Image (cartoon, rainbow, N blue to C red):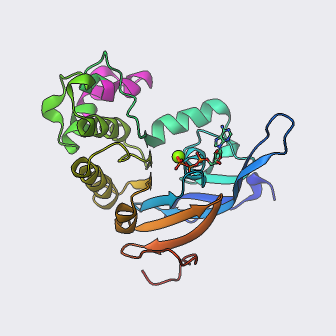
Amino acid sequence: MSAAASLAPPPHVLAETRALYRALSGTGAAPQTILHGIDLQIARAEFLALTGASGSGKSTLLYLLGALDRPTSGEVWLDGVEMSSLDDDDRAAFRNERLGFVFQFHFLLPEFNVLENVSLPMLRRGVPRSEADDRAYESLGLLGLEDLWRRKPGQLSGGQQQRVSIARAVANDPALILADEPTGNLDSRNAELVFDVFAHLAHDQGRTVVMVTHDREFAIRADRQVALRDGRVLGEGRRGEDILPSSRRLLPSDPP
Ligand SMILES: Nc1ncnc2c1ncn2[C@@H]1O[C@H](COP(=O)(O)OP(=O)(O)OP(=O)(O)O)[C@@H](O)[C@H]1O
Ligand SMILES: [Mg+2]
């Protein structure tokens, strides 16, 4: 069945992958399959933790969910749109307008102050400066950083820097926030703060959050945990459930 003939997911599903494969073809060597047919539905306002050992394919899946990479085969649906139906420009526009990314390293620009770091992506998209600054300031407020807006990133702690990068991802008003080990470099207090911010964004603001994490405690406290192993879904658990060593998949009919 071609992508165009596929039915869009139901409205409560914000993101869905269908039979998602990602292979890398090395020079001469046999292609290496990194994701082996991932089927995943992520509900609107869900806070999902993606776990798995190093090399299990978490970042690869996150990049595909963020339309930063193209699958070898399969489909990625975001907010009713199948990503392969868009050309490169439209996909980039979709990404800039609808998605927010947070990485382990914050990638803040050292020569710009905190407010400018948050407003720059909006300015690049053509948002007028006064509006971009207002939204940046509001977003910094959500992260408890409004008093630090004049500082340069180098004058902030690691936890504050990471929160600025979350403010930057959120200022755009994204439907989906994708975070790759956002607490990986933080001490436990700051990691806790960042976790709480993501939970707030999902539960109080209706945003959908997918967070890759190696932290088992955080994974258990998210709405749902999906664990990968060798490019396949190993199992899932609802909040409070430690999924290992079980390997079941949750069905939509399972009680919450
Ligand atoms: N550009 C690439 N070239 C070659 N191999 C790659 C490339 N990107 C990913 N891989 C391989 O694909 C597999 C999955 O990588 P991925 O980065 O998705 O894992 P991960 O679960 O995010 O791991 P980690 O927890 O270490 O970040 C690994 O075996 C990795 O070596
Ligand atoms: Mg990774």
Q: Which residues are magenta?
A: 117-135
Q: Residue 198 vs residue 160: left or right?
A: right
Q: Is residue 11 in sight in this rendering?
A: no
Image quadrant holding the C terminus, namely bottom left
Taking the spot 50% from the left edge, 74% from the top edge, the residue there is: 244
Taking the spot 28% from the left edge, 35% from the top edge, the residue there is: 164
Q: Main secondary structure of the magenta part?
A: helix
The vertical placement of 112 against 24, above or below, is above
The vertical placement of 250 against 144, above or below, is below
Q: Quadrant of residue 172?
A: top left
Q: Residue 197 vs residue 241: left or right?
A: left
State ligand 1's quadrant.
top right
Q: Is residue 60 in sight in this rendering?
A: yes
The vertical placement of 252 against 26, above or below, is below
The vertical placement of 235 against 75, above or below, is below
Q: Nearer the viewer, residue 74 or 8?
A: 74
Q: Nearer the viewer, residue 181 or 165?
A: 181
Tell me residue 63's x, y (percent).
57, 44
Tell me residue 207's x, y (percent).
38, 54
Q: Does the magenta run of residues contain 130? A: yes
Q: Quadrant of residue 247?
A: bottom right
Image quadrant holding the N terminus, namely bottom right
Q: Quadrant of residue 126?
A: top left
Taking the view exactly as shown, the residue that stands out farthest to the right is: 28
